[in-house]
Amino acid sequence: MIFDSYEAFPAVNFTAKVCILGSGPAGTTIARKLGAAGIPVVVLEAGSREFSDDSQDFYRGATVGDPYFDLDITRLRFMGGSSNHWAGWCRVLDSQDFEPKAWAPDTGWPISRADIEPYLPEVHDILELPDFRPDVPISDDIRWVQLIKSPAVRFGEKFAEELDKSRNVAVVLNTYATELAGDGKRVTGAKLWSNGQDAGSFTADYFIVCTGGLENSRLLLWSNQRSNGGVVPKATALGRYWMEHPTFEGGNAILADYSAFEVDATNEAFFSPTLAAMERLEIMNFGIRLIETPYPGVKRVIADLACTAPEMAEWVSYQLSQDLRCAAQLYVTWEQAPLASNRIQLSKADVDHAGVPRIELHWKKSELERRTLLEGLRLFGTTLVQKDLGRVRIADWLTNGGDYPTNEELAGHHHMGGTRMGTDVIKSVVDANSKVHGMDNLYVGGSSVFCTSGECNPTTTIVALACRLGDHLSKVIGV
């Protein structure tokens, strides 16, 4: 059942055991799982079926620190959430991403990759993916990895008919849960805002917050403030350890033969470090995206190399005599270490139309991120030399210690952390089953529970965790 406003919902006398806030990949996946188990669920979606400027305005906020996207641009507020601008890139976090790293404090998850692997076949069906192929070692330090570009599933479109016909799932649109009320043990209700006005309160046995990797923290911070700690009683880490995937063009390469690398349908290849290389260099995970440069750009790359890297001249000259025609851009996306200082706070000066404080995002890249980018490119360049596959030229701004460019991608629009998973209640917000520490009936879904970010796009892992949470709750709640 889908309702376009909260006003129409009470008339059907639908009693939900579970209230899910948000209809993005996490919220929709959990709702479908619970509905299939015969558990009545209501999904409250703040937006409508389509994008609107009025709804999107609720997402405005401020960023303090490094340049970042406008907060009302980097996510979407309508049915299906930010899957509506998802590009479709898919890969699951590596096994090593779940493990603690001695050189990076506060890394490590309370679960392992093995805990989500049973759900991957279901994830592949949801995201319309073929099976992933194993990584291929290129050297002791670098491996070829597969990113799959799915059809970019829009959850609000793909599952609308199924949800509308469901007898166990009710989706209520244009209904914004402005705050949760709690007594320090349980959530006792949600305060609602619909069609520009107060819509009263809603109660359910269980609540699952799936409003996104920024908004989850905002809702819980505000709810906790309003309830004097009654919603997140262990709140030291709430809003903290927020992460993104910095993304920049780190340089370019001359290649002996582009066909030496397996490429995808868009003629791109992807590479990441081995765990041994990360440990040796004490860096985080990274992904290098190799994009072939069209022929007219090859001469420019060669000229740049000749001027700035004369030690490569002999190799380049030899390859030119062999009709070299290959050059590539090197785009790097890398893992940001979890830092408590990177955090979401509530604005003290600005509120949305419902009176809820807007987000103030504090975000800066650390020296470890800078070292990961530079050493990662050097590592890739060394592998190409060792295998006589090519030569790498690292961008001048990076080798010269310059500022990050402001005219590039900046980051991946990947919002992770803020309600991170863990066993230490001082450094985490939810437990291994995504239940808020100290609360009996409050859970969190989505990438805000990520402890570390790895180097890959988060959607595949988000959906796997949502399948796992839906399965867990089906057993806990029963029918």
Image (spheres, rainbow, N blue to C red):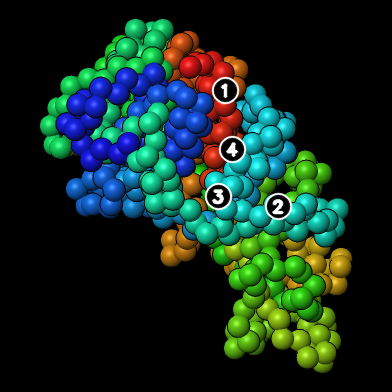
Disc on res. 127: 3
Tell me the SS state at disc 2: loop
Q: Earlier in the sequence, mark 2 or mark 3?
A: 3
Front one among 265 and 384: 265
Tell me the SS state at disc 3: helix
* CB within 8 Å, label 4 to label 2: no
* Quadrant position of residue 322: bottom right
Q: Position of residue 436 (x, y in %)?
A: 48, 18
* CB within 8 Å, label 4 to label 3: no
* CB within 8 Å, label 2 to label 3: no
Q: Earlier in the sequence, mark 3 or mark 1?
A: 3
Please tell me how crowded label 4 is: few (under 14), some (14-19), or many (20+) other residues with Cα within 10 Å. many
Q: Quadrant of the N terminus?
A: top left
Residue shown at 70% from the left, 42% from the top: 94
Q: Is residue 185 above or below residue 366?
A: above
Please tell me how crowded label 2 is: few (under 14), some (14-19), or many (20+) other residues with Cα within 10 Å. some
